[in-house]
Amino acid sequence: MERTEINSLGEFGLIDHLTRNNETRQASTILSVGDDAAVIDTFGKQTVVSTDLLIEGIHFDLMYTPLKHLGYKSVVVNLSDIYAMNAVPTQITISIAFSNRFSVEALDEFYEGVYAACEKYNVDLIGGDTSSSQKGFIISVTALGEVVPDKFVTRKGAQKGDLICVTGFLGGAFLGLTLLEREKKIYLENPGVQPDLENESYIVGRLLKPEAQKEAIQFLQDNDIMPTSMMDVSDGLSSEIIHICRQSQCGAVIYEDKLPIHEDSRMFAYKLELDPTMCALNGGEDYELVFTIKQEDYEKMVLNENISVIGYITEDIEKTKIITKGGNTYDLKAQGWNHSK
Ligand code: ADP
Ligand code: MG
């Protein structure tokens, strides 16, 4: 494989190279890459901003993360935060720092993923910053989005009687991570053995190529449903429900048998002798949305097969419970998710 040293392009040359095919999709993008700052028109909407930092060795492992997937995921996790505000993402900026281990070809792969996410989610890349680092790859993405004035949804509006909903499936990304970490260990001990991930493409995909919940937000808008609270599931469902309850001054009850767990996740959990419910409650990085709605919106919500109603909000401040299939009640624990493995 060809290797072009970044020094051969220089910083400006590199930025030009990385942004040479950059497109503008949003009418609100007045001025994009190439000046001291970008310019955005808000057309009377409110602007939502979110930013994330991703560090090699802490948030991702390049031993099993293809750079293209990493570029895609770096964008998607930020867009997920924008959707979690009930907003629609419009622009991103992306800043990178890398050591001389990285070539122009490596950064090209990373940007291929970035541009694929921009296209899929209809956002514009409008700027960033480029620097060298002594060691490893560092990525910071900032996402902007727009929302009709005062229609943004925070974590603190849940009220007694509201229904708790979650999009998609939970626990898959954690199981994908567990599998890749296991294969990495085997490989390091015995480099001759090639990992076989063919049969587990679902869980591996959940970790390496997550999606943001664009359709769910569209569904809420189309059906005139205004969630009372919402956040994305990045640290694990338990931890997110505890956040919502703390900020909304309420409690919650969820049902084990309502938790959406994909069949492939369930099978793989059994293989490792893990409890699929614990994976769904405590596994991170699923990038689904958890939100609460008024009971009167229930009829509309069940029309969406991708959304599960898993429980309800109580007035018992900060008491968060799960009722198991056997009928026992336990406290939800914020075991969360330890990004450093
Ligand atoms: P400054 O010296 O003001 O920081 P730069 O030379 O770093 O400007 O950036 C020039 C232009 O390129 C700016 O529009 C900036 O937002 C954009 N840019 C810089 N790095 C990146 C990157 N990694 N990806 C996308 N755009 C970038
Ligand atoms: Mg700069």
Image (cartoon, helix red, strand yellow):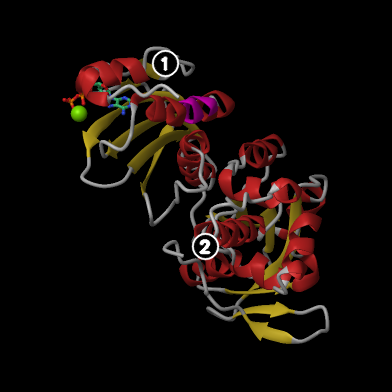
Looking at the picture, does residue 232 appear above or below residue 152? below
- Tell which of 163 and 323 is nearer to you: 323
| Residue 256 location (% of width, % of height) | 75, 72
Looking at the picture, does residue 295 appear above or below residue 303? below
| Residue 219 location (% of width, % of height) | 70, 38
Question: What residue does disc 2 label?
Answer: 189
**Is the residue marked 1 within 8 Å of ligand 1, measured from its CB?**
yes
Secondary element type, mark 1 = loop
| Residue 99 location (% of width, % of height) | 26, 39
Residue extent of the magenta highlight = 112-116
**Which of the two discs, 2 and 1, labels the residue nearer the N terminus?**
1
Question: What residue does disc 1 label?
Answer: 22
- Tell which of 52 and 323 is nearer to you: 52
Q: In this view, does 278 lie to the left or right of 59?
A: right
> Residue most toward the front?
192
Residue 240 visible in image: yes
Helix, strand or loop: magenta stretch? helix
Give the spatial CA distance, label 2 vs label 1.
43 Å
- Tell which of 332 and 246 is nearer to you: 332
Can you tell which quarter of the image residue 212 is in?
top right
Q: Which mark is residue 56?
A: none
The amino acid on which the numbered mark 2 sits, given as a three-letter code, is: Glu
